[in-house]
Amino acid sequence: MAFKIKKNPDGSVDCQKAQLVAKGCSQDMGELHYFLGIEVSRSSTGSIHLCQRKYIQDVLDKSSLTNAKSVHTLIVSSSTFSKKEGDRLVDPTEYKSLVGALQYVVLTRPDIAYAVNRAGQLMQLPTTVHLIALKRILRYLHGTITHGLVFRRSIRLSLVGYVDANWGLDFDDRQSTTGFCVYFGHRPVSWCFKKQKVVSRSTTEAEY
C-alpha cells in the first residue's frame, strides 16, 4: 500500500480504501504501530524500525531474568552444544518454551538466529548446561533489547544473497550447518540457519 501511495499521488488509494470501508471489508485504523509482538516506529526521515522490546521483556520477566546481568556475546568460545554435556533436566518444559519464544524473536533479530538454531537442536533431551547456554541468549537480549531491523529509503534496491557453512562443528554427529542471509537494498529480508543432512568430508563439500 505504501508503494502504491508513493507512485499514485492522485488519491486513488484513498478512494479504494473508502470503498472497502463502506462495504464493511476493512477499517482504516491508521498507521501500524504494533503487530503480534512486533513494534513498528517511523522516523521523520521515513525510515521504519521493527523491534520486539515488549515481547522480549515479557520473556525475561517469565524467566526471572529481568535484573540479570547482560552479556556481550551469545555463545562462549568453549561451548560445544554437545548432547553429552551436563545432567538431563527433570522437566524440559521451560527449555522448550524458551526455545519457542526465541525462535519468534529471530523474526527481527537475525543476530541470534544461529545460537537459537543450535539450542533448538537439543530440545529432545536438554541438560542443565544447555539451559544455562539458552539463558545466556536471553541475557544478551537483555542488553540489546531495543535492537531490531531498520529499513531506510534507498535509491538502489538490489537483491543480494550471502551464504556460508561451518564444517563438522556438531560434536555429536559431525554434521555441518549452513546459513544464508538475503538483502534487499541495505537491509536483510530473509535469513536462515539449517543443519545439513549428511556428513561432509571437507570444507568444500560443506559449502557446496
Image (cartoon, rainbow, N blue to C red):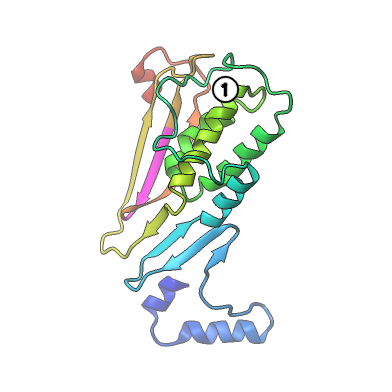
- At 45% from the left and 26% from the top, the residue drawn is 177
Compared with 53, 180 (above or below) is above
Q: Main secondary structure of the magenta part?
A: strand
Compared with 52, 9 (above or below) is below
Q: Which residues are magenta?
A: 179-185
Compared with 4, 141 (above or below) is above
Q: Position of residue 168 (x, y in %)?
A: 44, 17
Let me know if residue 180 is in the magenta part: yes
Q: Which residue is mark 1?
A: 129
Label 1: few (<14), some (14–19) or many (≥20) C-alpha neighbours in 10 Å:
some
Q: Is residue 157 visible?
A: yes
Q: Position of residue 23 (x, y in %)?
A: 68, 84
Q: Amino acid at mark 1?
A: Val
Q: Is residue 121 visible?
A: no
Q: Quadrant of residue 63?
A: top right
Let me know if residue 27 is in the magenta part: no
Q: In the rendered view of the protein, which quadrant contains the C terminus?
A: top left
Q: Position of residue 103 (x, y in %)?
A: 56, 42
Q: Tally the numbered discs.
A: 1
Q: Quadrant of residue 120?
A: top right
Q: In the image shown, does 168 or 96 lie closer to the viewer?
A: 96
- Name, please, the residue furthest toward the left: 155
